[in-house]
Amino acid sequence: MGLNLTQIDKVDTITKEDFINNYLKPRKPLVIRKATESWPALQKWTFDYLKEVVGDQVVPLYDSSKADPSKAINASAAEMKFGDYIDLIQKEPTDLRIFLFDPIKHAPGLLDDYRSPKDLMGGFLDKYPNMFFGGAGSVTFLHYDIDLAHIFHTHFHGRKHVMLFDYKWKERLYRIPFATYALEDYDIENPDFSKYPALEGIEGQETILEHGDTLFMPTGFWHWMKYLDGSFSISLRAWDKSWAIKAKSLYNLTVQRKFDSFLKKRYKKRYMDWKEELAVKRANKALQAGEPK
């Protein structure tokens, strides 16, 4: 049976009423192909232009290796000048990625080049975008965003394969306790169901993003991404109206993160091994119980 993946809905444009009723309220992902038609960035943000405005900045780089229990979460694997990294991903495949990069700090003029989709919903954090860059073949591991925001994720100059899973599948995805990511020992693109049986039959959605496509990811959705070409994306975040979700976001960012960091720093590999064992136990329990129901 394997994973049960369906294609994410795609539209060229959508009205506010249709978006709210059919995607925002029911928490359903959507790809909007022409949401960026009015963005100067659609043509302006070439690799050469970004090198020109941000090229000398030294940026942390990340790879797909399993997290080191002795290091902080999101510890980088290397550093490089931004311009040199852009040359690298245009030239050849690489596992190295730039994660949560805010170029606006270094080039404020970039703020004028994109538009938050306020015609669809409110709550956007306009001046705090995140950008992500990857070489062909690089992978963003399976996780959900700790702040539980709605995400509008727009891709540039290449293709990106995306898989999404509703938050309700968290235990079956082998969620690591006190964290927002899954067990890193399996490949969600080609899982070994004999070793990780809880993945069998999980329902998800997938799509291939191309230049200018915008993916709406509702709050709490687990996502895995693979760069098929050297390319980049920008994520615009919007708060959910639910006070319960806002409270959970605050808890994640303060209590849970500090608690997890403290135990990781103190117990290192022992703590990480315990969390991975618990993730497997919970996944098997959820599978046996037929969850989610």
Image: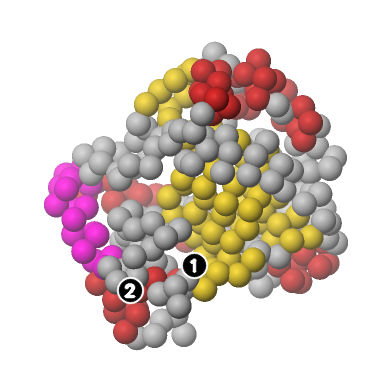
Q: Which residues are magenta?
A: 264-280
- Residue at mark 1 to residue at mark 2: CA–CA distance: 19 Å
For label 1, the SS is helix
Q: Position of residue 77 (x, y in %)?
A: 35, 31
Q: Nearer the viewer, residue 246 or 156?
A: 156
Colouring chosen for the image of the structure: secondary structure
Q: Residues within 10 Å of mark 1 (few under 14, many from 20)?
A: some
State the quadrant of the N terminus: bottom left
Q: Is residue 197 above or below residue 57?
A: below
Q: Is residue 172 above or below residue 33?
A: below
Q: Quadrant of residue 196?
A: bottom left
* Picture residue at 76% right of the left edge, 32% below the top: 41
What amino acid type should be assigned to the residue bearing mark 1? Tyr
Asked whether, in this view, residue 80 is left or right of residue 89, the answer is: left
Q: Main secondary structure of the magenta part?
A: helix
Asked whether, in this view, residue 66 is left or right of residue 144, the answer is: left
**In the image, which disc is placed on residue 167?**
1
Q: What residue would you read off at disc 2?
A: 197
